[in-house]
Image: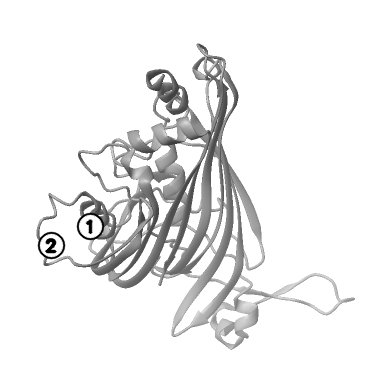
Amino acid sequence: MRHLLLPLALSFLSLPSGLSGSRSVSVPPCLGGSVSLPPRLSGSIPVSVPPGLGGSVSAPPGLSGSLSPRLRGQDGVTLKYGGKRGDSTPVKGESTLTLKVDGTEAITNMVRSAMEFLQFQKIHIRGEGARKVAKADKKSVEFHVEYDTARVDGSFDDEPYEFDFERKTPPEGLDKDKLKQICWFFSMGGPQFIVDPKGSYKSTDPNKDAWGEAMDLVANGVVRLSDKPVKAGEEWTSDWKGQYKQKDNDGRFNFTQKSKIEKIEEKDGRKLAHISHVLTGTLDIPEAKRDKNAEKQETKLEAKGTLVLDVESGAIVSSTAKGTVIAEYKGLDPNTGDSHELKIQFGVESKFE
């Protein structure tokens, strides 16, 4: 019966690349941040006119310094991702990945035994290191977070664990301890991702799939930036189709993101843009690839986060993110007629400053 149920369950779900196997571990770049580079404000600054006088006036550029920060903060900024290769800023990060598998006992046990990674209940990482620009040109920027030290704790197969790592001194016996190996690569591998100037995401992992893309977007706080200049309080909405297909069913996510400039402030000699965002997504599986025996077969994403960007340099000052990716399946075994249900939930939370 195992050979009938397992394909039934896995036909709608593949783990993010590198997490499903039991022999090797690739680093899923899903815990990081993003940056944006609005240009300097220049030219004349609008000044409101008392009601009844009509029209508006502009202060000459040379007098703009005498205007209050409140008025200067009303100018719109053009947001884009940017950076120079070799840029490096200190970073403290904290990331948590939680996993929960529920459903009919037989199919749940089979999925857990087939996918070693699903025996994790929690992976919690706290680290210190640097956020670096690995590559940069007019078309894209590649960001890496590299921890020098990290503590990793959580639970695996309902048992607690804890490790302290230093990049310069890998632990002994790493190749013989599967749990330690996964935790090492999650922490020392660090988040990595690529964005174009307006926030179109691309993974550095050639084996990335739809689930991995969704989790990356949540944890890294990637924002689709407005095509127009935006002021404090203004909002914009972006809709797009995910770039990566899910294994076995060719599904791709339909994403919607609503973003807002909460405020633009001057602090410690820098102009900072505070952005909030809400991201939702649904895995769109081609009809021909859907399980014909499934009563329910869906995967959804919900997340929210914040970014604080240095307007002048494009550096990310801080970020927070929290969200879930949930897959649900309900179907009949075509040979026995038995009904089976499966629900797999990934929770992702991160904070970088």
Q: Quadrant of residue 244?
A: top left
Q: Nearer the viewer, residue 21 or 107?
A: 107
The answer to whether residue 25 is seen in the rendering is yes
In the drawing, does residue 289 fall left or right of residue 294? left
Q: Amino acid at mark 1?
A: Trp
Q: Quadrant of residue 166?
A: bottom left
What number is the disc on residue 346? none
Q: Callout 2: helix, strand or loop?
A: loop
Q: Residue at x 46, y 22 (%)?
A: 8
Instruction: Locate the C terminus by quadrant.
Output: bottom left
In the drawing, does residue 164 fall left or right of residue 80? left
What number is the disc on residue 184? 1
Q: Residue at x 54, y 60 (%)?
A: 305
Q: Callout 1: helix, strand or loop?
A: helix
Q: Residue at x 52, y 19 (%)?
A: 291
In the drawing, does residue 301 fall left or right of residue 114? right
Outermost residue toward the top in this view: 335
Q: Give percent across and percent down for residue 40.
A: 47, 69
Q: Which colour style is shown? A: one colour
In the drawing, does residue 103 fall left or right of residue 153? right
Q: Mark 1 or mark 2: which comes first in sequence?
A: 2
Does residue 34 sit above or below 326 in this rendering?
below
Cβ–Cβ under 8 Å for marks 1 and 2: yes
Q: Amino acid at mark 2?
A: Pro
Q: Give percent across and percent down for residue 92.
A: 34, 72
Q: Which residue is mark 2?
A: 170
Q: Give percent across and percent down for residue 281.
A: 57, 41
Q: Nearer the viewer, residue 312 or 258?
A: 258
Does residue 314 sit above or below 50 in this rendering?
above
Query: Dot 2, how many residues are within 10 Å of its Cα: few (below 14), some (14-19), or many (20+)?
Result: few
